[in-house]
Structures are given as C-alpha cells and as structure tokens.
Image: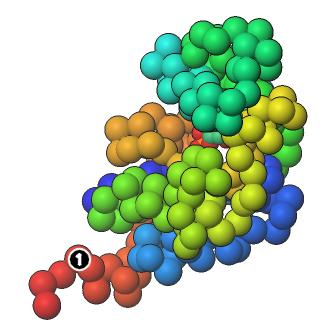
Amino acid sequence: MERTLVLVKPDGVQRNLIGKVISRFEHAGLKIVALKMLKPSKELAAKNYPDSNEWYTKVGERSIGTFKSMGIDVKKKFGTDEPVQIGKTIKGWLVRFLSSGNVVAMVLEGNNAAAHVRRLVGETDPLKASTGSIRGDFSIDDVILGNTLNRPIVNVVHASGNSQEAVGEIKIWFTEKEMLSYVVDTDKVYYKEW
Ligand code: CMP
C-alpha cells in the first residue's frame, strides 16, 4: 500500500475548491489517512520544493520551452536564459505564494497512490492538462500568464511526483502520529480476491 501527499494550494482554498478536489480522490477509491488546514511559514513552504539543480532545471526548462514556442524572449523576462537561474526565481515565487494563505494538506493511501493522484491531478500547466483532471477542469492559468505576473502557475493542487518523493514530502507536513489507520468499504472492493 502506498501513500502520497496532496496540498490544496492557496488558490484552491480561496476559490472554495477544497471539497471538489477531495471528492475526486475519494471517488477514485483513495483513502484520506491525514488531513489538516494551515498557513505555512516561508520555511515550511520552501521545504516542500527541492533545493536541487535537477528540480530548478526542470522548472526553468518548462518556462524556456513555453516562451520559445510562443516566440517570446525568455531573457527579457528573467534576465537570463539559464534554466537553473530561472528555476530559482520561480521557487522564490512559489515560497511566497504557498505561504500567502491557508492550504489544506492531506495524505492519501491506496494502490499506486502517487501515480493515480498524478493522473487525477493532471499536467502542471493547466493549459496542457486534460479535461477531466483537476487542473484541466479547475484552472485557466498557464506558464506565460504566471511568469508575466511574477508568480508561479496557480494550478489548485500540489501532488508528490512519485512514491519516493512522497515519503519525503509527507514527513514535511505530518508526523507519524497524525496518520490514521482504518478500514473502509472500498478496501473490501480493491484489496481482496473476488
Ligand atoms: P506543483 O505541483 O506545486 O510543483 C511545483 C510548482 O511550481 C508547480 O505546481 C507550479 O505551481 C509551479 N511551476 C512549475 N513550473 C513553473 C513555471 N515554469 N513557471 C511558473 N510556475 C511553475
């Protein structure tokens, strides 16, 4: 059985989407084993996103790719075309954004929880997220709009990238004691022989 972390970010909370987001996971059969609302400090928000060149490069390259595809000069926006530098700027925006208001943090449990949650959440850029996914259905933001306004993409939720990342991220937001073990009827559907 796998666990993964989901945050309803400040935009999702402000837009009264908490219930709608949670219901997507519940309907798929994932079990909520921990849940809380809090206003993260800057330090806590910073911990949620890796301080690694790999992560900065991934995020920076997303902006570079989108700016290029639209024929917009990325250097004019960021003063550099170095992915790591751009990624670092975006992390600064993310920390400011995530600590700007209340978020709902939860741990979801189930078969292949991390992968299923990512599927339900959809692509990072809502413009590319499939209809039917949380970001595809609940956001009209995109990379260019966010970057133009010096803020991260507002895409309603954060979800751990994979089960390994989930282990680290869950520890940032929850103690072992805050996670509850219980049985629901869904368990009887998925986790038994028929
Ligand atoms: P999240 O799933 O929380 O993980 C990292 C976040 O950074 C992502 O959702 C977006 O909110 C934001 N993000 C990622 N790439 C970019 C980008 N190129 N420009 C702006 N924000 C980004």
Q: Residue at x 13, y 90 (%)?
A: 194
Residue 192 pos. (x, y %): 18, 81
Q: Nearer the viewer, residue 42 or 155?
A: 155
Residue type at numbered disc 1 = Tyr
Residue 190 pos. (x, y %): 27, 79
Residue 175 pos. (x, y %): 53, 43
Q: Is residue 109 left or right of residue 26?
A: left
Q: Nearer the viewer, residue 72 or 78?
A: 72
Q: Is residue 41 left or right of residue 119?
A: right
Q: Residue at x 80, y 41 (%)?
A: 145
Q: Residue at x 38, y 87 (%)?
A: 185
| Camera sees residue 96 | no
> Which residue appears farthest toward the left when viewing the image?
193
**Colour scheme employed for the rendering of this structure:** rainbow
Report which quarter residue 42 is drawn in.
top right
- On screen, residue 79 above or below 46: above
Ligand 1 quadrant in view: top right
> Which residue appears farthest toward the front when viewing the image?
71
| Camera sees residue 156 | yes
- On screen, residue 186 above or below 93: below
> Which residue appears farthest toward the bottom when viewing the image?
194
Report which quarter residue 76 is drawn in.
top right
- Residue occupied by mark 1: 191
Residue 142 pos. (x, y %): 71, 46
- On screen, residue 129 above or below 144: below
Q: Is residue 1 left or right of residue 71?
A: left
Q: Secondary structure at mark 1?
A: loop
Q: Nearer the viewer, residue 77 or 29?
A: 77
